[in-house]
């Protein structure tokens, strides 16, 4: 027996009458929180939209701040608001946006490591400032306001929101996120990576379920409709349809007569005398009607018929 301190590994023993399987079984814990993840089609559409938004934001902020920067789409995820709030371990500048539809919520979350370099650039500095222990003041919020308005306008353009407009509110603390998105709902989080000077950080959008559904309907409505693969061909006329019909064709010796007694005595290996000269040509028939004289030949591994004169009874009318 093993001591209590030893690690005991549980195994599943096969039934005595069953066959032993060579591969070991792996048991993985089921995580029901992964339900409701983005479908492949939704992820594809959102990726295309937000990759374009990243390029537009990089160009606009480059001109506004006067410093080269790079923005890349990093992740797309759909998780519960409760889990999202728990994941915000890094200090963030959290800014909720108001929309004309109160049920829709959009939250902008910006890495605090990038806030102070941006403030320094806006005030004419080199952008090398670090956050340290300093708290943001109301003046800092006013200076940053135009940056977030620019982000909101570009987001509206990328999302193509004809009926909704984003209006920034005052920044909030992470514990107040559930006032905009209920903790038991799913939130769609679009995360971007940004490189500004020597600093690297992130910013992300968090959508409520209502806004996500509205956004997906708007995106799908603007997608070009796929053309069906069904093709319509003109109906062929009667002559073309008849010419495409299959007909049984054979090469045979026509008009031969054989005594019944010769047929009755036939056995495997017997030779039946047809009493026809070897020079007598066979006849190529189609549907029982003779068309051409023919001689049996071989074409590679296939039997064939070499055509000769047209039969006197053949009457082909050209249409």
Image (cartoon, rainbow, N blue to C red):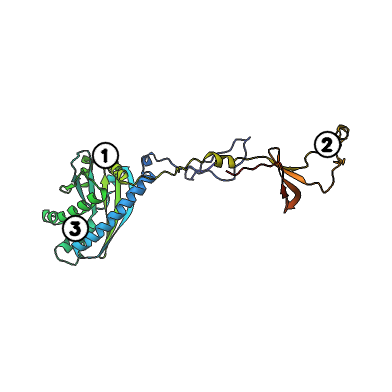
Visible residue check, residue 181: yes
* Residue 88: % across, % down: 27, 49
Could you tell me which residue is drawn at 30 percent across and 51 percent down?
A: 49
Nearest to the eye among marks 1 and 3: give it.
Answer: 1
Residue 133 badge: 3
**Residue of label 2:** 257
Mark pair 2, 1: CA separation: 91 Å
* Frontmost residue, 13 versus 192: 192
Determine which of the numbered discs, if any, sits on residue 96 in the image: none
Crowding around mark 1 (Cα neighbors within 10 Å: few <14, some 14 to 19, many 20+) is some
| Alpha-carbon span between mark 1 and mark 3 | 37 Å
Image point 86% across, 34% down: which residue? 259
33 relative position to 248: left or right = left
Point 16% across, 58% down: residue: 134
Question: Mark 1 touching mark 3, by CB under 8 A?
Answer: no
- Nearest the camera: 150 or 203? 150
- Please, what secondary structure does the residue beneath circle 3 have? loop
Q: Is mark 2 in CB contact (under 8 Å) with mark 3?
A: no
Answer few, some or many: residues within 10 Å of disc 2's Cα (few below 14, many 20 plus, some between 14 and 19): few
- Residue 280, position in %: x, y? 81, 46
How far, Cα to Cα, is label 2 from label 3? Answer: 117 Å
Residue 317 position within the rendered picture, expressed as x and y whole percent measured from the top left = 62, 42
Residue 172 visible to the viewer? no
Mark 2 lies on a secondary structure that is loop
Between label 2 and label 3, give the one nearer the viewer.
Answer: 2
Name the spot of residue 155 as percent of width and height, x first: 24, 51
């Amino acid at each position: 027996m093993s001591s209590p301190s030893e690690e005991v590994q549980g195994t599943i023993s096969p039934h005595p009458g069953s066959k032993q399987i060579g591969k070991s079984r792996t048991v993985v814990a089921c995580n029901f929180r992964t339900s409701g993840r983005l479908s492949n089609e939704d992820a594809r559409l959102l990726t295309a939209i937000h990759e374009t938004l990243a390029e537009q934001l990089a160009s606009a902020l480059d001109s506004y701040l006067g410093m080269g920067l790079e923005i890349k789409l990093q992740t797309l995820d759909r998780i519960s608001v409760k889990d999202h709030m728990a994941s915000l371990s890094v200090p963030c500048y959290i800014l909720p946006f108001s929309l004309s539809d109160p049920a829709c919520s959009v939250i902008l979350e910006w890495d605090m490591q990038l806030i102070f370099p941006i403030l320094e650039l806006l005030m004419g500095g080199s952008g090398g400032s670090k956050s340290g222990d300093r708290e943001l003041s109301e003046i800092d919020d006013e200076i940053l306001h135009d940056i977030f308005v620019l982000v909101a306008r570009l987001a509206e353009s990328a999302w193509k929101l004809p009926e909704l407009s984003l209006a920034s509110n005052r920044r909030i603390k992470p514990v107040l996120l559930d006032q905009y998105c209920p903790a038991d709902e799913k939130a769609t989080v679009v995360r971007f990576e940004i490189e500004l000077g020597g600093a690297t950080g992130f910013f992300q959008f968090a959508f409520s379920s209502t806004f996500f559904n509205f956004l997906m309907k708007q995106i799908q409505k603007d997608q070009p409709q796929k053309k069906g693969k069904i093709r319509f061909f003109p109906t062929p006329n009667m002559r073309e349809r008849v010419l495409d019909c299959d007909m049984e064709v054979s090469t045979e010796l026509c008009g031969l007569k054989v005594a019944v007694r010769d047929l009755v005595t036939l056995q495997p290996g017997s030779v039946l005398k047809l009493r026809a000269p070897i020079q007598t040509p066979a006849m190529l028939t189609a549907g029982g009607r003779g068309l051409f004289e023919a001689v049996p030949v071989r074409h590679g591994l296939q039997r064939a018929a070499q055509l000769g004169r047209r039969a006197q009874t053949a009457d082909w009318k050209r249409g």
